[in-house]
Image (spheres, helix red, strand yellow):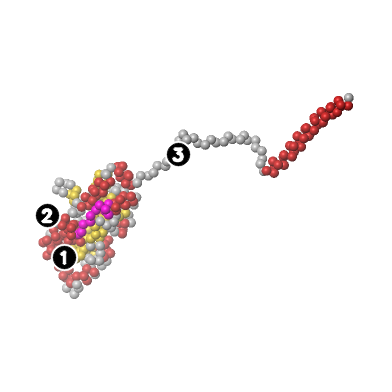
Amino acid sequence: MVVRLLSQIRSYAVLIICPIALVFFACSMQPAIAQSGIEPSSEPIAAPIAPPSAESTPPVPTPQLKSDIEQIKAKGKLVIAMVNKNNPPFFSESKEGKLVGTDVEMGQSIADSLGVKAEFVRTAKNFDEVIDTVYRGEADLAISKLARSMPRAQKVLFSKSYLTFRQALLVNRLALAKEKSRGLSTDQVVQDFQGKIGVYAGSAYVQYARQTFPKAEIVEFANWKDAIDAVVTDKVMALFRDELEVRSIVVNQPELAIQLRTVVLTDTSDTKGIATSAGKQFLMDYTNLFLETQYKQRTPNQLLDYSIVK
């Protein structure tokens, strides 16, 4: 009987002790959770993101803008602005109506090197309007015996010089003799010029004349032939332009040598360049490389031989 009683006591003890032990264990774990700073979450745990597979679509690259040269190649032509006047040996129309001249040949050669055709646009009435044509983006290049002046360089990009001239005066001999009768030398008359000077309207020589001859009266001529007539008839005392243009007048019309005299200024220069708009830096770099490696500069005397009327 005693054994049976002890067995029953052990059974009751197990039933009492186990719940107490479980409660004690739960209480001992609660501070540990609070101390860790981690609060139990009721949210379900997200499944891990699988790494992208090798067969997933790659990101689309950002398209690159085409350079100015690529755009020219895409349209298949190089548009070149040129003044709508004949100015041999640089540009003029032949009897057959074909555009010829050294500047024309240069523009064609640049186009050929790019693998496109050359298209010459001759809507400009003077040289300043040629500059405006490329400034507005209506042509890729301007090749028109353009003087590289500071005001123009504020609007367009200029290439390196492909021609360099001295500036010159074509003076009426009789008017010059009157000035020298006051005891002045030719150099003194030129340095302190106070008469009328004719210039080609819309050319850089309008500005050059104002800078070089501040005391002179500047007279602009839209037609160069009218300017020559004016100096012959003493309506102006002199014409002011580059040495090639001035010298070629007397060379092509030797009878005028009796009335007119050429005076070349040795302390000035007139450099000619190719122009393009500010957004075509690739084209300008390419043009400079062409001038450096492909173009052979001509001297004023060589060009004078070209310009002589046969």
Q: Nearer the viewer, residue 256 or 201?
A: 256
Q: Mark 2 points at which residue?
A: 310
Q: Where is residue 205 in the image (x, y as percent from the top left)?
A: 25, 60
Q: Nearer the viewer, residue 93 or 112?
A: 112
Q: Residue at x 28, y 48 (%)?
A: 139
| Label disc, if present, on residue 59 of the rendered structure | 3
Q: Is mark 1 on a helix, strand or loop?
A: strand
Cα separation between marks 2 and 3: 68 Å
Cα separation between marks 1 and 3: 75 Å
Indicate the quadrant containing the N terminus: top left, top right, bottom left or bottom right: top right
Give yes or no for residue 100 being in the magenta stretch.
no
Q: Residues within 10 Å of mark 3 (few under 14, many from 20)?
A: few
Q: What residue type is labelled 2?
A: Lys
Give the magenta range. 290-300
Q: Name the residue under label 1.
A: 261
Q: Which amino acid does label 1 sit on?
A: Arg
Left or right of residue 135, residue 37 in this image: right
Q: Position of residue 127 (x, y in %)?
A: 25, 54
Mark nearest the camera among 2 and 1 is: 2
Q: Position of residue 263 (x, y in %)?
A: 19, 65
Residue 309 is at least partly visible in this image: yes
Q: Residue at x 27, y 61 (%)?
A: 207
Q: Which residue is drawn at 45% across and 37% down?
A: 58
Q: Is mark 2 on a helix, strand or loop?
A: loop
Indicate the quadrant containing the C terminus: top left, top right, bottom left or bottom right: bottom left
